[in-house]
């Protein structure tokens, strides 16, 4: 009997059916167990969706999951699970293995094309940065315009009654920066009056001392009387 491609494909399908028949369904569905084992050796963010399974010798099943780590295209997280008589499924091994085409070099690209792609990427990045800077400058200009509008509104609210004849602003109630000038003047006058009273008291005290000295001199020298 001559072998044909159709017969070979049928034989392969029959073999797969036989493998599936002997594979333990608990192992094929042990995704939670496999993921728990992977999370012990790699962050959960590096593990993708399930990518099938393979039946190994001795009834071992290798569950495969997509890999999301950059730098490892077409690599698969692989967890081998098995069932021991009288026990629940257990993990034998967890590792990162190359998938189809993972170990093949990428297609060669001429240097001129790679350089052109690099320059295009740099130009796009510069354009994005320029747009961001322009947006920031536009926001600053808008803020300055708003400030100028507010100042114009304040000036428009003023009228001639708010200024002296020479055009200087009138300081209502003598206030400058929250300080009442009238109160300062009153305090200054009180200080001057207090100084004058102190000087008067000092003069009176000096006159009294002079009188006391004269009286003492008269009493101590009877011949001068």
Image: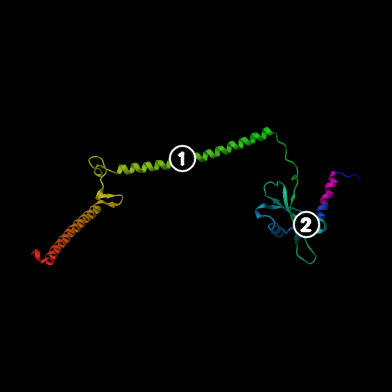
First in sequence, mark 2 or 1: give its number.
Answer: 2
Residue 220 location (% of width, % of height): 13, 66
Residue 48 location (% of width, % of height): 68, 52
The crowding category of the residue bearing disc 2, from other C-alpha atoms within 10 Å (few below 14, some 14 to 19, many at least 20), is many
Query: Which residue: 38% across, 43% down?
Result: 147
Determine whether, in the image, residue 143 is placed left or right of residue 156: right
Chief secondary structure of the magenta span? helix
Q: Is residue 160 magenta?
A: no
- Asked where in the image residue 167 lies, by quadrant, the reply is top left
In-front residue for pair 160/206: 206
Residue 195 location (% of width, % of height): 21, 56
- Asked where in the image residue 89 lies, by quadrant, the reply is bottom right
Q: CA distance from mark 2 to mark 1?
A: 62 Å
Q: Taking 130 as reference, is 95 above or below it?
A: below
Provide the residue span drawn in magenta. 5-13
Helix, strand or loop at mark 1: helix
In-front residue for pair 17/184: 184
Name the residue carrying label 2.
Answer: 61
Residue 186 location (% of width, % of height): 22, 54
Q: Residue most toward the right? A: 1
Query: Which residue: 84% across, 44% down?
Result: 5
In-front residue for pair 215/24: 215
The crowding category of the residue bearing disc 1, from other C-alpha atoms within 10 Å (few below 14, some 14 to 19, many at least 20), is few
Helix, strand or loop at mark 2: strand
Query: Which residue: 27% across, 50% down?
Result: 175
Query: Which residue: 67% across, 33% down?
Result: 113
Name the residue carrying label 1.
Answer: 138
């Amino acid at each position: 009997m001559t072998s044909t491609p159709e017969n070979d494909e049928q034989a392969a399908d029959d073999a797969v059916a036989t493998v599936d028949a002997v594979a333990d369904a608990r192992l094929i569905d042990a995704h939670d167990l496999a993921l728990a084992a992977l999370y012990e050796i790699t962050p959960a963010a590096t593990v993708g969706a399930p990518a099938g399974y393979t039946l190994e010798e001795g009834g071992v099943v290798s569950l495969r999951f997509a890999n999301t780590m950059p730098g490892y295209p077409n690599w698969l997280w692989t967890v081998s699970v098995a069932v021991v008589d009288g026990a629940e499924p257990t993990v034998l091994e967890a590792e990162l293995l190359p998938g189809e085409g993972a170990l093949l070099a990428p297609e060669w690209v001429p240097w001129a094309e790679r350089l052109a792609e690099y320059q295009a990427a740099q130009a796009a990045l510069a354009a994005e940065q320029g747009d961001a800077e322009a947006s920031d400058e536009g926001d600053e200009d808008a803020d300055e315009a708003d400030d100028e509008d507010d100042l114009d509104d304040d000036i428009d609210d003023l009228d001639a009654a708010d200024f002296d004849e020479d055009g200087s602003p009138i300081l209502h109630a003598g206030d400058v920066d929250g300080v009442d000038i009238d109160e300062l003047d009153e305090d200054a006058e009180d200080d001057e009056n207090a100084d004058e009273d102190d000087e008067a008291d000092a003069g009176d005290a000096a006159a009294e001392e002079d009188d006391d000295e004269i009286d003492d001199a008269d009493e101590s020298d009877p011949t001068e009387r």
